[in-house]
Amino acid sequence: MIDTWSIRNFVPGPDDRDVRHHFFAAFGKFDPVTNGHWGEMFAEVVHRAGAQHELYLETMLTPDQGEAVKLGRELGWNDDFSVMRQRLLAGGMTQVVADGRKNLDVGESKMGEILKCGTATPDMGCGVTLRFQNQVLRAFSKEEVFAQMVAGFEIASADPRVVAVNLVQSQDEYRALHDFDLHMRMLDYPRVHISSHAGELTPGEVKPEELLASHIRESIEVGHAERIGHGLDVVY
């Protein structure tokens, strides 16, 4: 199981050729467990943060646990972002946001119970301020990516615990590369902080021209990113 969930002892084979894909495939394998145990996960990370004398922590997750992806798939694509956003809001996005906030409530409640916050003997993690970034999986179809962004924008606007929207998933995925410019335009939304995994590409993974595509610059200037994660291809 550890070999499957990590790159320990990785040996390429006919059905598992690439170590990067092997790594990213692990998320789908442990998601069914993690989505039911946010409270334990929150408790673990804030306990560690408290033990290291940290005061503030932002962690990435998907508050709605995939509901926005399903909604986007059901409603389909429209080239007019405003029309599509209104379609999502009228088609069930309010419930997606409400469910996401409820998931955070349940997770934080369980975390407080585990760490004994508010009791005479609280864990050191109880003193850490925990906030969340709503991650957007960018290797999905454009309608699914847009729906995730709208869900992130809406929950960040309604819930102070959610402080940013963050694009994740391997940047050498076909849709992440092909739809990159579109994704950046999708992020044009007021009042919501944007963080992004960008500039992850290195020689040998993609065509040379894709290393020179200014993904970091465009993430900042078009996608409004205030933080860049990874940033390896800045040298190009």
Image (cartoon, grey):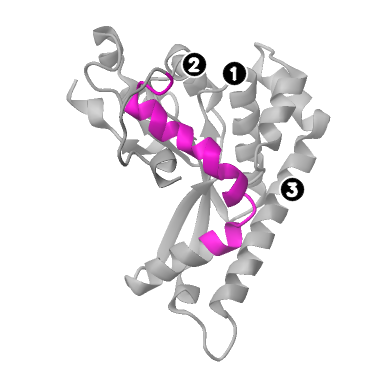
Identify the magenta region. 15-41
Q: Residue at x 62, y 75 (%)?
A: 113
Query: Disc 3 to disc 1, how far (Cα)?
Result: 23 Å
In magenta stretch: residue 19: yes
Q: Is residue 191 left or right of residue 98?
A: left
User: Marks 1 and 2: in contact by CB < 8 Å?
Assistant: yes
Q: Which residue is mark 2?
A: 175
The residue beneath circle 3 is 99
10 Å neighbourhood of mark 1: few (<14), some, or many (≥20)? Answer: some
Q: Is residue 86 above or below residue 116?
A: above
How far is disc 2 from disc 1 in space, using C-alphas?
A: 7 Å
Q: Amino acid at mark 1?
A: Ser
Q: Identify residue type, mark 3.
A: Asp
Secondary structure, mark 3, is helix
Q: Position of residue 41 (x, y in %)?
A: 52, 59
Which residue is farthest left? Answer: 235
Question: Which residue is drawn at the image coordinates 31% and 34% (left, top)?
Answer: 10
Image position, residue 198 (x, y; %)? 36, 29
Which mark identifies residue 7? Answer: none
Q: Determine whether the residue tagged by mark 1 lies in a helix, strand or loop.
A: loop
Disc 2 to disc 3: CB gap under 8 Å: no
Q: Earlier in the sequence, mark 3 or mark 1?
A: 3
**Vertical arrangement, residue 116 with respect to residue 96, above or below:** below
